[in-house]
Amino acid sequence: MFNWLTEIEEPIIPFNEDNGELKIHKIENDKNLTHMSEVCQIFAALDVISEEDGMTAYPTSNHQATQLIMEEVVPHYEVVKEIFIDGELKEINVFRLKNNSRRIIEELLLEGVYPVIPDLYRSKSINRSNYPRRLKYYSINKELINQIYNKETDDVFSFFNSSFLAENQPLALQPTGWKLQSQLKDSYTIRAFSTFAKQLVLIVNDLDNGVIGLDIYN
């Protein structure tokens, strides 16, 4: 195996079980934005590239995260729902990009999107679980990665830390078109995220070397 990877056992992820009264509140919004933050691009771009609408759940771990989601993410979507447990807002679910926001992504993909996007999503095909798999897990040895620092990734991880990673849970990304091979070490995503993440784990289907997941720990 490559020296920049260490095979590990399947990580044990603490399960946050929220037992309580569930309430779902739909948010109506008619605001349209003319720009899209890098955080929103990471999740919205997959819908455009794959030509499929997917639901994204944004954890509302604190006021900072909630405010950013409401200001920079919610206006881009047609369907927005707040999830409450015992009266406490736990997450905001977004689904189906507005046409204007879809055009923003399409223009960014042509003119200069956040560089992680075309690297993370290299094909239109999303990995599905309806075919044989034998999963292996590899921790990336960050000290052997030629890391890239930029302001955009700094902003992205500032939000990740206040939202997705705030409850000691990993953030699971879905790369498309990735294969476990030597040149993956030069992936822009891996080089950029290695700068900030405590640990990056590749989830690989050992039957075809397809990378089906990139988990971020902090």
Image: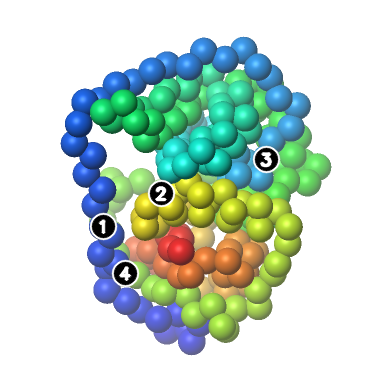
Distance from the alpha carbon under mark 3 to that under mark 4: 33 Å
Amino acid type indicated by mark 3: Ser
Question: Looking at the image, which residue is at 51% across and 60% down?
Answer: 178
Mark 1 and mark 3 lie on one chain; the one further toward the N terminus is 1
Distance from the alpha carbon under mark 4 to that under mark 1: 19 Å
The circle on residue 127 is: 2
Q: Assess whether mark 1 and mark 2 are in contact (beta carbons under 8 angstroms).
A: no
| SS at circle 2 | loop
Q: Nearer the viewer, mark 3 or mark 2?
A: 3
Which residue bears the numbered disc 1?
14
Residue 39, percent across and down?
60, 44
Residue 38, percent across and down?
66, 45
Mark 4 and mark 1 lie on one chain; the one further toward the N terminus is 1
Mark 2 and mark 1 lie on one chain; the one further toward the N terminus is 1
Which residue bears the numbered disc 4?
136
Q: Is residue 127 above or below residue 80?
A: below
Q: State the residue in front, 180 or 167.
A: 167
Amino acid type indicated by mark 4: Lys
Distance from the alpha carbon under mark 2 to that under mark 1: 25 Å
